Image (spheres, grey):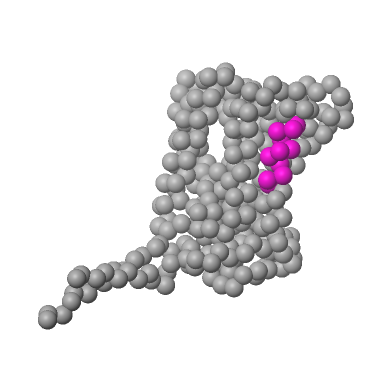
Amino acid sequence: ALSRSGSRSSSMPPRRSAGRTSLETGLGALLLFWLPVNVCNKLAVQGMPPSRALVEMCLPCHVYTGLCAFCFLSTRRRARVDGYSLMLHCAWMPLLALAFPDLSAARAIATPALRVGSLAAFWAHHLTLLAAPVLAHQQASSRLRFAPPPPRAAGLLQYLAFIYAFVGVLLCGLALATGRNLNYSLWPPPALPDGAYSYLGGARYRLVIGTLLALVLGPLMRHVVVPLAAGSLRPLVGPLHGLLGRARPARGDERMTAQAARPVTRSRSRTTPKAQ
């Protein structure tokens, strides 16, 4: 009979998952913590109806929070390679939210203490999101934990597919159904300076914004902004990495990133029975 044997090359990522460092566990837990905090903030503090709160939890920054938490808390290739690349490409989400914040619901709170707390939660949440890709990139540049997917264009293609599905289909569909401007893809933000609308395409605003998000802002954040921020902040967070970021809770952890970033290759050999 014909027998077939399969063997995996040494480029396969190890089956045994590497453990998390203390820094990754702490930051991942903090990111997850912001999700229920924001739900309680919208329902109990800002007084939103559940249907509106559910829609607003689909905003880019909340989805980005879940993505970052997944990248830091999981040690699978999907998180440390694919998710890491997507996290860097989408780093414009908290940056634009801070540049054009929508704080109308928080400012409408009558109680001063609750109003201040709601505003403080917004800024603290988004500052945490700004720090997440920078810390991840610093560990990737040290060949510790994260790595971009091979080949180089794979990360961009994954980002374009995500942006089309999330922004072009989900968010725009929710905006048309609810009438709420969820991420300024359909309408410009209210805080846009006078005269800036014409520079963003005017009547072609949606086409221009979609092109900028997909082909300009994403690659710019991935290859320029986040690496520059990581390099400039390295002297400040270097001691923190020394205390928490270089922990090795599992054997083979230092080789996890390099192995996970390589493509999976399989080799098959066929053996034919000898003639009787």
* Residue drawn at (79%, 28%) of the image: 45
* Residue drawn at (84%, 21%) of the image: 110
203 left or right of 229 in image: left
Q: Residue 114's x, y, as percent?
A: 84, 29
- Decide: is 63 above or below 229: above
Q: Main secondary structure of the magenta part?
A: helix
Q: Residue 54's x, y, as percent?
A: 63, 28
Q: Residue 35's x, y, as percent?
A: 68, 39
30 within the magenta span: no
87 left or right of 3 in image: right
- State which quadrant residue 139 falls in: bottom right
* Residue drawn at (26%, 69%) of the image: 4
Q: Residue 193's x, y, as percent?
A: 64, 25
Which quadrant is the C terminus positioned in?
bottom left
* Residue drawn at (70%, 59%) of the image: 23
Tally of marks = 0
69 left or right of 110 in image: left
Q: What stretch is highlighted in magenta?
A: 31-41
Residue 76 versus residue 135: which sits nearer the camera? 76
For residue 198, say whether it is visible.
no
Outermost residue toward the left? 276
